[in-house]
Image (spheres, rainbow, N blue to C red):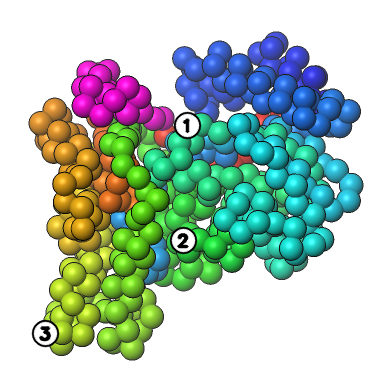
């Protein structure tokens, strides 16, 4: 369909069922308005002559397994109802044009390896194309207009959603939707690591692509074990929320990098590259020598890794059984370990600013033992994750907005579908 025909279909309610599934019955009208705005953006930018398609890729929330994926650990994550949407149309030639709402258009000639800028979206586009071709998949040029409500700096992985969007468009336009979501996630990670220039694990990309709650075991990152969980949080009377405490991630690269570096010091003491290749018993047996070689904080962070892996396994079993008590105990345990062992809740170099610590403490004051909370994402600044009884969400949101500013608390829906083509 041409974009104007897609707009007519939306106006007539043709995608209402899909909107209800993705965003909830009470958000059908805002969803219509948002997709119509994207279609108008496409027409204004590229015209109305080509057949177009509509795509959606969710952001993700890390539920447990903080800073374990880069050492081949285990995680639990979930896709959420904040997403990036795209209107796209295939084109002849080798030039890809992507206009993201509010940003300058990216134009990449994928036949020229120098036609992108490092640390820009164009690098992610070029990297996904290169990843598809290196794996023997087909590619094609396209025009796309995107808009995103995946909050940047929130730990919801806006960059992974964008990468997966490029891969999802290529999957449908050039490969008959034959490329599985794990492969698209691996290609997306390749683009971020090799072209954009940011080291990252694979959790973000897999969780954005999969949909719903997922358990991921990265013991072999080339073939991660991904287990989708049939678990409906809302049916159990709970909502998921993030609270943005403020703070700037721009100066935290060294803090993030130190976690990986220090964990590697421990594994390298044993002649291994990753902590997953050794055991906690081996660490404890050699503890005095490891402390001398790597330092105490490195040992603490390694202990966090081992304990977090065990915790994730217990939480996965709890979710399968619908045992929220055990699952929430694990969420709180993950948060406590992140504070005490991993030490990524605030910066030791800047102890005066502890927005995350404050927010976590306020959760204990407001919610008590029937809920759970933890640091969300990379840590040091930014957001916390909270599970709230649904009937308490309004009061909790108002309280947190009062503490940290209007809009600080965002209540989310776990959506069951991952990266999809809607029409």
Q: Magenta includes 393?
A: yes
Q: CA distance from mark 1 to mark 2?
A: 23 Å
Q: Is residue 54 left or right of residue 402?
A: right
Dot 3: what SS? helix
Look at 18% across and 69% down and name the residue there: 297
Quarter of the image with the C terminus is: top right
Sequence-wise, which precedes: disc 1 or disc 2?
Answer: 1
Please provide percent x and percent y for residue 221.
48, 68
- Label 3–label 2 contact, CB within 8 A: no
- Label 1–label 2 contact, CB within 8 A: no
| SS majority, magenta | helix
Please provide percent x and percent y for residue 120.
60, 52
Q: Residues within 10 Å of mark 3 (few under 14, many from 20)?
A: few
The segment highlighted magenta reads: 389-413
Between marks 1 and 2 in the image, the one whose residue lies nearer the viewer: 2
Sequence-wise, which precedes: disc 3 or disc 2?
Answer: 2
Q: Name the residue carrying label 1.
A: 81
Is residue 121 visible in the rendered image? The answer is yes
Quarter of the image with the N terminus is: top right
Look at 15% across and 84% down and name the residue there: 292
Is residue 64 visible in the rendered image? The answer is no
Dot 1: what SS? strand
In this view, the residue in front, 155 or 57, is 155
Sequence-wise, which precedes: disc 3 or disc 1?
Answer: 1
Q: Which residue sits furthest top? A: 12
Q: CA distance from mark 3 to mark 1?
A: 47 Å
Q: CA distance from mark 3 to mark 2?
A: 31 Å
Q: Name the residue carrying label 2.
A: 200
Q: Name the residue carrying label 3.
A: 288
Compared with 356, 239 (above or below) is: above
Compared with 292, 410 (above or below) is: above
Q: Residues within 10 Å of mark 2 (few under 14, many from 20)?
A: some
């Amino acid at each position: 369909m041409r974009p104007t025909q897609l707009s007519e279909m939306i106006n007539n309610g043709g995608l209402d069922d899909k909107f209800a599934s993705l965003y909830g019955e009470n958000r059908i009208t805002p969803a219509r308005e948002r997709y119509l705005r994207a279609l108008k953006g496409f027409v204004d930018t590229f015209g109305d002559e080509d057949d177009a398609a509509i795509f959606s890729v969710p952001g993700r929330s890390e539920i447990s397994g903080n800073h374990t994926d880069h050492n081949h650990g285990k995680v639990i994550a979930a896709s959420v109802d904040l997403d990036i949407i795209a209107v796209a149309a295939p084109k002849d030639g080798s030039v890809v044009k992507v206009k993201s709402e509010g940003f300058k258009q990216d134009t990449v000639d994928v036949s020229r390896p120098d036609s992108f800028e490092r640390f820009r979206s164009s690098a992610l586009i070029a990297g996904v194309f290169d990843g598809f071709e290196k794996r023997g998949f087909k590619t094609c040029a396209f025009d796309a207009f995107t808009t995103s409500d995946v909050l940047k700096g929130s730990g919801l992985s806006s960059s992974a959603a964008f990468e997966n969007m490029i891969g999802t468009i290529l999957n449908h336009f050039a490969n008959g939707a034959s490329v599985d979501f794990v492969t698209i996630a691996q290609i997306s990670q390749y683009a971020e690591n090799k072209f954009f220039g940011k080291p990252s694990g694979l959790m973000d990309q897999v969780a954005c692509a999969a949909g719903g709650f997922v358990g991921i075991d990265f013991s072999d990152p080339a073939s991660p074990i991904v287990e989708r969980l049939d678990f409906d949080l809302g049916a159990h009377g709970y909502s998921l929320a993030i609270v943005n405490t403020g703070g700037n991630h721009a100066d935290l690269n060294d803090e993030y990098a130190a976690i990986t570096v220090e964990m590697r010091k421990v594994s390298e003491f044993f002649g291994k590259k990753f902590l997953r290749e050794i055991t906690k018993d081996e660490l404890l047996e050699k503890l005095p020598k490891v402390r001398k070689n790597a330092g105490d904080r490195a040992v603490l962070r390694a202990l966090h890794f081992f304990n977090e892996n065990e915790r994730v396994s217990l939480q996965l079993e709890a979710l399968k059984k619908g045992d929220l008590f055990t699952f929430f105990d694990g969420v709180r345990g993950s948060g406590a370990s992140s504070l005490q062992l991993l030490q990524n809740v605030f910066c030791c170099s800047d102890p005066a600013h502890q927005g995350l610590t404050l927010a976590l403490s306020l959760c204990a004051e407001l919610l008590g033992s029937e809920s759970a909370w933890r640091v969300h994402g990379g840590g040091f600044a930014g957001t916390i994750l909270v599970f709230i009884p649904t009937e308490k969400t309004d009061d909790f949101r108002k309280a947190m907005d009062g503490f940290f500013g209007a809009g600080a608390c965002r209540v989310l829906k776990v959506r069951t579908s991952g990266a999809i083509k809607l029409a």
